[in-house]
Amino acid sequence: MAYLTLKGINKIYPNGFHAVHDFNLEIEKGEFIVFVGSSGCGKSTTLRMIAGLEDISKGELLINGEYANDKSPRDREIAMVFQSYALYPQMSVYDNLAFGLTLQGVDDEVIDEKVKHVAGILGLTDYLDRMPRALSGGQRQRVAVGRAIIRKVGIFLMDEPLSNLDAKQRVTMRAEIAQIHRQTGATTIYVTHDQTEAMTLADRIVIMRDGRIQQVGTPYELYFKPVNLFVAGFIGEPPMNFIRCKVHNGCVEIGGKKLDITKNLGSHAKAYEGKDIQFGFRPEAAVLGEQENAYVLQANVELTEMLGDNTNVYVNIGSKNAILKVNPHDTPATDSDIVFSIPVESTYLFDAETEMVITDEEPVKAAQ
Ligand code: ADP
């Protein structure tokens, strides 16, 4: 059985705002789950319902198989790290780490052992006597994480824990959080709006939009098998290119080139005859020149950005814009006309109306 089960969870705030709709998810022990989505999509609300800091309006929360909707936060075996890490400023790092255990009346010797163990994991051993004001942002965040992991809890909840750090500290701390998870094996739910954090940390990602789950899957599944236009556009930087076009005789026309979409859809293409679809491909899927088993397009280069490891090429395909990621040694000249190919298996087609992906297989469900 799953360690944490969310069954048809809804949140309707007292002002009537329906912030979370029918959220279903099963989390296994030890998993690292990331809730990702734009600001306001309901990530924190869901996390706070799991923590017991918000009432669940409808649905069931099971922790370790037990109905937990009415359990107080203290009885849920949960520790939470917030965005603002709120350390006690007048206490040393040691005392900040020890505080929760002291309150619980744990033996001093046991506390000492645990504080030293956690400080070791977090690289804080040399800072135990320091006051929080004498620490960097990253070190303070580590103390906040340490305060949460020092208690033996079942579930570790983190709400945008890195958002107060600068870009460099975020990357370092991200790797540390992954390392801490490997060492502790604690079931973790992590909220972020940052797709890179989601992709790098998660065993499974839950992508949310307007209070609804869009897709649950491994980073690989979300990247390579997005179920809809939103997920396809959310994950990936620069984002996937989408070109809206109409299906006519099993083909679409993009920038003067006719593309036979039965290569993707087989006989399913018939269902889209006369309809609009979105033709999607990732910038890195484009290959300069003409290739076999690929859709070949022509474009005009508007602008190039040499980034070192690759070049982003902003092109105009007919009247549509797209970005291609190419080898910097092959950077085309601005204003030149180019031909490029997208391997058939690297293209994604979406129903322009429902925004769901279309394939030659049976339709995929939006959420599990
Ligand atoms: P996220 O964490 O994804 O940024 P939140 O879960 O914080 O989103 O918020 C989801 C939605 O619920 C937002 O539109 C927010 O304005 C709304 N919301 C949050 N708290 C309350 C509240 N106490 N009363 C009414 N609406 C709220």
Image (cartoon, rainbow, N blue to C red):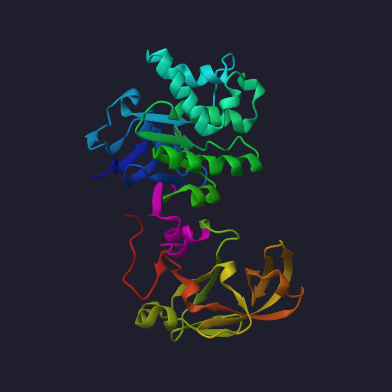
Say which quadrant the C terminus sits in: bottom left
Number of marks:
0
- Point out the residue furthest to the right here: 334
Please say whether residue 17 is visible from this viewpoint. no
User: Which residue is rendered at x = 52% and y = 60% of the image?
Assistant: 233
**Residue drawn 36% across the image and 35% down it:** 50
Within the magenta stretch, is there residue 221?
yes
Residue at 31% x, 25% y is 75
Can I make out residue 317 in this image? Answer: yes
What span is colored magenta in the figure? 207-233
- Tell whether 169 sits left or right of 33: right
Of 100 and 124, the residue lying toward us? 124
Q: Residue at x 53, y 51 (%)?
A: 195
In the rendered image, residue 93, in percent from the top left (x then y), is placed at: 56, 21
Locate residue 206, reporting x and y percent. 41, 49
* Residue 19 drawn above or below residue 292: above
Residue 284 sits in quarter: bottom right
Is 125 drawn above or below residue 292 in the view shown? above
**Image height of 163 relative to 265, above or below:** above
Residues 288 and 54: in front is 288
Q: Does 60 sit above or below residue 337?
A: above
Image quadrant occupied by the N terminus:
top left
Locate residue 322, reporting x and y percent.
62, 69
Relative image position of residue 196 (x, y in whole percent): 55, 51
Residue 312 colored magenta? no
Is residue 36 toward the left or the right of residue 325 in the image? left
Asked whether 178 or 37 is in front, the reply is 178
Q: Looking at this view, is 331 or 134 the one in front?
A: 134
